[in-house]
Amino acid sequence: MEYFILFILFVCIVVLFNSLSKVKEENEHLDSLYRKSREDYNSLKNEISEIKKQISQSGFTAVDLPQKNEIEEIPAPVVEVLSPVIPEPVSSFDDVLENEQNRISEEALEKIALSFDSQGIPVRGTNKIVEEKETPAPIQNIETSSIPEFEIQPERQHKEEEVYVESAFSIFIKKLEQQFAENWTGILGTAIMVLGIGYLSIYTALKVSPMFRVLILWLYSGVLVGSYFFLKKKEKWFKTGLWLRSAGASLFLFGCFGASQIPTLTFIESIPFAYSLIGVGIAINLYVGYIIKQQTFLSLHVILSILVLCVIPEKLLITFLLAALTATAGIILSYKEKWEYHLLIVISAFIIFDIWFTQGVHSLSPSQNIFAILGIILVSVSCMYMQYRSIYANTRFDRIAFITHLTNWILFALGLILHSTGSKIKIFVLFAAGILCLFAALFARKKKIFWLYHLDGMVSFLLFSLSIIMLNDWKVGFDVIACVLYFLVITCLFIVYKSGETLLHKIFLGLNHILGLIIFGFFIVQVNAPFEQTNNTSTFVSLIVMTLITLIVPVFCAVKKEFLEIDSLIVKKDLSLNGIFSVLFSTLFFVSWNHTIEISFYYPLVFLALLWCFLQFKFKTNTFDLGRFLFLNTTIIAGLVLIFQNPKSNLDLVFALGIIAVITLNWFVKLFYTNEHTIKTIGIIGVNALLVLFAYKYLAGYTIIQVFGLFAAALINHEFLWIQFKRKTLSNDNQVLLYLFCLAFSIFGSALFLYNTQFLSYTEIGLTAVGLSVIEVYILFADKIRNKSNEEISDWKNFGTLNSEFILFNALVFGFSCIQIDYIPVYLGSLALVTFWIFQKTEKMKRYNIYSFVLLIGCVLLSIYLAVFDADKALNKNILYITQTISVLISAAYSYLQMKSQKGEGKMFIAILPLIQNLWIIALLFIQVEIVYLPLLFMFLAILNFGLILYKKIELASESILVIGLLSILTSVYYSIKVLNNFTLQDWVLQLSAIVLLIVLVFLTKKKEFIKSLQLDYQIAINIWLSIIMFSQLEHKWLPVFWAATAIVNLLLYYKKIGNKKEISIVYYLLANFHLAFVSFNYFEAKFEFVYLIIFALLALYIFIIYKYIEDFKLRNSIIIYPATFSIGLFLFLSFDKGILTFFWILESLGLLILGIILKEKYFRYVSLSLVGVCVIRLMFFDLSNADFLIRALVLLGVGVVLLVMNTLFKKYKERFD
């Protein structure tokens, strides 16, 4: 019954589809009729618009139309022309067109208007009708005059034809159909359809036997295939028909697969018959994909076929072979076409299948793997054969074909790896495959398929390389394999270069780079951590072979000039890659020599260094030049290391001779590339390093001799420089280098002298300092002693003056070693004076000007250091104070010398020296004086600097006075905060004296018009300083008094024109109000009520002054009255009992009224009356209900009295507010 219902549904779907097609055709016909009618309507509408334009022309004349049933007599020929006044023709015409309820239809109007275009207009005065050709009749004649044709012979009225308007749903269905039929969503539809049918099959599986279930699936597939023959006749549904046919073939394959693999569909138990049925399904599936002649469908069917095989749970050999045959068939079916994407998809799918097949616990036996390999070869050969077709002849490069062929080789290699049997015979198989691949590459070259020739040539090389690597199975060591493999790369490199194959040459050159690095890394591992090998191959011998192979290549290329660019280094084309590797392998050879042979490796190293130097002398190539450069450096470094590591012996002399021999021979091969001084620079460095090493190794036990030995090395460099300078055999750079070594030895000798002073006596230190100074004086003035010809020394003549620093260094070493530290500041100050005097007398010691200043700075820093660390030593205090005093006097003398100096350079530090001296004195005061005295002392120092600057005794920026004053303020503030609320009388005297001195300094600076560049407001600074002191020391109840008093003082200063900022007084006034309102209630005590009365009086006084005398303050009403009223009111609210609060507030309002009367300000009256209103409201709603009876009575009485007083005052002084 269920199947019958499904069949009936299917038939209904087919019938519905056929009906829908017919409806679609009829709809298209109706749509064409509608478009045609719409075009006709638009044409008529345009004609009406033209008539409308003609009617609206200015030269139009109108006459009344005659009635047809009347006989009109035409009188004498009197021509009467009517007035051309047309009463709004356009508007009446528009009304006719726009009125949908008019009795005359739109079509009738259009016909009438068109008929009037061809009618004649009668004119009186003639017996015939004159036809008007240019001016049409007006519309009002149409409306007013009777029309005989329309009245007597009315036309048959036609019913207006209704225009069909397509619905939105119909348009949506049409678009949906077009999208489904034309887009690639058919793929998704096919997949969903197959999935739905699969679910339907599962449902039916519960009702019938498995065989019938499979037959139902095949029936569905037949229906889908049959639908193709029905849809292919319709152009828009042709592609959908193709997808349905493909779906049918896929469903048939699904049935074949399910007949043996899906439990609910399984009715075949025989494995051969099951796989045969699957093969038939795959064949039909591939055939359907092939006959479409599109690679998309063929690729899809191949993938579906392989996917079905992937779902089979048992991984049998027949499954793999069937997949191989499927892939092969899919490839062969595209033989006549150039479907590269299809080939790539098939090969990729088979690779994925092979990887899936080899995973898991089920694996093939070795014999089965042989058949699997044959299957892989079948797929790979079929794909390879596709690339050798004539269609690819004479092609340079085909990207997709190249990727396909490369993927095919990946398939071949991966298949051999996954199905390898482990037999040793595989080396012969690989070698034979390499030969065959080589012949295939030559065949591709013959057909001029160059990309295929290159690819297969590289594959043949890889096969040969694999066969060489597989020699390890025959107990051949990896070192030998590496040598053979490298030789193969070199051979191929020469062959392709000789053949002129540019691409292959680049590839093999890259392989030469990569393989050389890999082999080099391999030998590094072998030399440093050799692993166990199963043969007798020697790494040492292999390194010799690699060194020879890599060395022979650049030598051969140098002999045969045509091969010079065969192995160019990728980063530098003028170097031979194998030459570089020869140097690297030689290095490993020396390391292996050191591990293998007892004789020192230094001898072959010297030999190779000389050999490479000879090769460069013979062939003059960049490679040999670089090689001899590297071996020169290696020989020097290795010799120095051996001398350093080995104990004292005669071998040190041998190693030194080897270094000197290599340096000497390379000295005569001058040029390194185009640079002449590089090799000589290395030689100079090497010899000097050798001198340092011998001095360290053999003179370390002799302190003074070692010091003079280093200075002797400096003299050697110095004298060799002058000899070569006379002969003109060194470049300027080498001359500079020699002098730098001379200076370096001098520096190290001086440093060693400094270090050894701890082991020497005062006499030895003094004599050594004198001896070294003599040598340094000789070097300093050597240009006047040796250069008698006065030849120009361009680059290193100024280096000689550095010896003056060494002389000064000896003096410092002597001073710090032999003089007690307490007297060192005086010594440094005296040395500063001496060096400054030498600077003025000698031209060679120009830097002594700077050094003298540095010495003075050292004197300053050392005196500060001693003040810090020796301050607690009572015995040294007198010496400390004396040395500090002497040092300060020496610095004053130094300043005097600078002011009197005749040289411009001598006055270099005259501006900064006073600043340093001030900082010095400030630092000493900070260290040694109690902080309570510092503000006063700093103010004295500021006034002292003011006097010195004013009378031009020092060159110091005038702003420094402000800095010192600021420092005084900061120290005072710090001390005030530190001893919070704990000032003694002495503290008050000292702090206030500092403030007085600041005021004096301010008056002095203003009187002398000092510091014009800074527009500072000293009034603000003084107020802030005084406020901080008072805030930190006064009790809270007195702070509002101070704020208010300070506000009055600043206001008076502003009034007297002493201060220019009235805002300062405003700030203090507001601060007093804020403190009174929000802070004072926390500290309220009844016994200090007089303090708050003073505050109220001061605030009232401030208000009186500002309203009486300050007239330029525009916002005084809002800034002055409100804060005072609010602060006093809030203070009363927070400090007193709530019952009597109203009385206090009414007193406040009374005070405001009295103040307003005195000042004649009616604004005060407004504020007072506002406050009275608040008090009355509070009295009515709070005091009468919450307060105590007695307090209530007193408040009422007091408020009443105050109100009466206010009333009396207002009446008496009312005129003062007018």
Image (tube, rainbow, N blue to C red):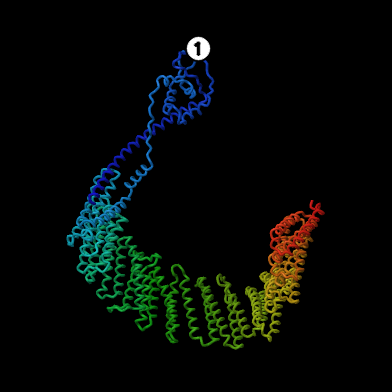
Residue 1015 in sight in this render: no
Residue 1158: quarter of image: bottom right
Kind of element beneath mark 1:
loop
Q: Is residue 403 left or right of residue 766?
A: left
Looking at the image, residue 427 lies above or below residue 404: below
View extreme (right): residue? 1212
Q: Residues within 10 Å of mark 1 (few under 14, many from 20)?
A: few
Residue 341: percent from left, percent from top: 30, 55
| Residue name at image x 55 percent, y 79 percent | 746
Q: Nearer the viewer, residue 158 or 1130?
A: 1130
Residue type pointed to by label 1: Pro
Q: Is residue 240 left or right of residue 568?
A: left
Q: Nearer the viewer, residue 528 or 816?
A: 528
Residue 1204: quarter of image: bottom right
Q: Nearer the viewer, residue 703 or 928?
A: 928
Q: Is residue 90 left or right of residue 540?
A: right
Residue 702: percent from left, percent from top: 53, 87
Residue 1019 in sight in this render: yes
Residue assigned mark 1: 77
Residue 356: quarter of image: bottom left
Residue 753: percent from left, percent from top: 57, 83
Q: Nearer the viewer, residue 127 or 438?
A: 127
Q: How many marks?
A: 1
Residue 400: percent from left, percent from top: 31, 56
View extreme (top): residue? 76
